[in-house]
Image: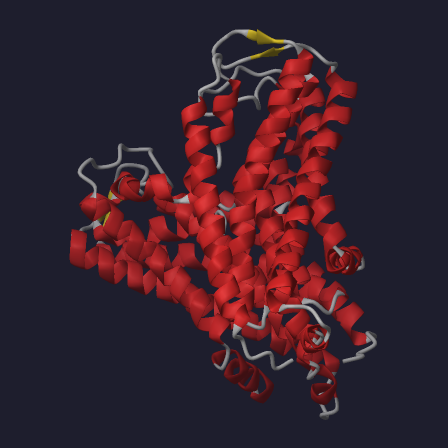
Amino acid sequence: MRSLRLELVKLLHQKRTYLGWIGLALVPVIVIVAGALQKPHRPDPGDPPFVTHVGQSGLLVMLAVLYALASFLLPIVAAMGGASSVASEAEVGTLKTWLTRPVSRTGVLFTKWLTAVLYALAGAALVAVVSLVAGVAAFGLHPLVTLSGTTLGPGHALALIALAYLLVAAGAVCSLTIALLLSTLTDSSLTAATIAIAVFTVLTVLNAFSAFDFMKPYTYSAYRLAFVDLFRSPIYWQPIRRALVDYGVTVGALLLAAWAVFGRKDVLT
Amino acid sequence: MGTLSREFTKILYQRRTYVGWAGLLAVPLLIVLALDLSSSKPAPGEGPPFFAAIANNGVFVPLAAIGALSFFLFPLVASMAGAFPLAGEAEQGTMKTWMSRPLGRGTILFSKWGVAVLYVVVGMALVGLGGLLAGWLVFGAHPLLTLSGTTIGIAAGLGRIVLANLVILAALLCMVSLALFVSTLTNSSLTAAISAMVVFVVLTILNGFSYFDFMKPYTFTSYNMAFINLFRDPIYWHPIRNALLVYGATVAGLLLVSWLIFRRKDILT
């Protein structure tokens, strides 16, 4: 626990921690300003779900923002968190010092992973709170109409939205763990983060081609919008369960690989 | 020129350089593979621009590839390229050594910018040549059908593809300069690259809302599809000219600010 607290202190003393959070928090602000002032226009069938009707309820702001977050920003910020964990200590030359203390390498690795997970979760929570407060202030708290046409009370809807945020954050943990694995393989945090983001993007592109449908059930990127199924009535649990199994296996395998690499790594800096 | 060639030697000794180039080259090859393997051909208008035309004409592969890449992967690689040369030296502690040589700070800054641009140019050339070769082998080369319905010869078509690459290169110069600018403010290459990407994503989201249309003429992200107009007959130059003006102003502005900051920066490592 003590090493986790130390990691968190380190995290909070870095400029980029706040840059990531600010970037995330800008999204709900943009969506609300645009939704409040935009001239009403006919919904376009190509629009992502929830985005068109943002002005109807503050809760829809949370979902529209989550949509943008799941496809782009959260994987980027999570990859940054995962990549800076091991590699940036190697860059600054403090990894050696760190390892001279009576801590096990396993402990160091998992503490760093946990710190990065907390960073991504805090980012998601920040976005949720900003979009809830600002969205309700701008558009009011109204019942949510599900994709199946039924209506959910605000309390029930909020609980489902919280679940959806957790699900998206779990998807981001996959990107983060890739970045962590890469940051044990290289001494450059930039390389680790870029490759992790590129892997996510390339997998997303591959998911769009029917020729690569065979790999869809196994790639974590294919489930990035699985949270939408929470807003059917009754809730369509099957894809969500699959997403969670896939995330679990991906994160477990990557962590194991990272542990195997870092456990026997020559730490030169 | 000597400074630039030394910078280029440096990046050729970094693993990340080749990872980035290989990742870019993989995209046109995967597109060709996906279209060759899939049983159903994409419907016209589906996927990125020029995508549906590939199956009948391999010459469209490099075009579809740069169209698909310019949404996300090209900016990502460009921001990595722009962030590393300056901040990477600060991270490794070689900046001070570099500064002790009889070179102006302006020369150093611009050779760093130049090497990042060279990196991006090589990446784009790989995408273009690799895509063209793979497309030609798999789908054959035929005269190109323009968006206006006329047909142009292969040589003229290739000329326009080169022009399209130059327009996209100009857009990527904005990302390179943005990352370079942030890297004069921080000593971490990861922070510089991620900040540039966050700016890119936030601007793209802003461009998606009609309320923010007033800033569209001034943001470099809103022109990423301008190159399409090269494939009308006659070429519709107006949006391309606008795009190049905005790119030029953005790059010049960012370089000027970077130079003002770097000129008087305290170099501590």
Would residue B140 appear left or right of A2 to someone viewing this image?
left
Question: Viewer-proximal residue, A32 or B147?
Answer: A32
Q: Is residue B125 above or below residue A138?
A: below
Would residue B130 appear left or right of B217 to someone viewing this image?
left
Query: Residue B210, percent across and down?
Result: 61, 28
Question: Is residue A212 visible to us here?
Answer: yes
Question: Viewer-proximal residue, A30 or A15?
Answer: A15
Query: Residue B39, percent across and down?
Result: 17, 38
Would residue A231 appear left or right of A9 to someone viewing this image?
left
Q: Is residue A27 above or below residue A33?
A: below
Q: Tell me which residue sits at (59%, 64%) in the image.
A: A106
Question: Viewer-proximal residue, A240 or B87?
Answer: A240
How many badges with numbers are in the image? 0
Indicate the quadrant containing the N terminus of chain A: top left, top right, bottom left or bottom right: bottom right
Question: Viewer-proximal residue, B267 or B60?
Answer: B267
Q: Tell me which residue sits at (69%, 31%) in the image.
A: A128
Q: To which quarter of the image does residue B249 belong?
A: bottom right
Q: Tell me which residue sits at (35%, 59%) in the image.
A: B26
Q: Is residue A190 above or below residue B144?
A: below
Query: Residue A269, percent across and down?
Result: 65, 80
Question: Is residue B196 visible to us here?
Answer: no
Colour pattern: secondary structure
Q: To which quarter of the image does residue B269 belong?
A: bottom right
Q: Tell me which residue sits at (69%, 87%) in the image.
A: B98
Query: Residue B194, percent across and down?
Result: 63, 56
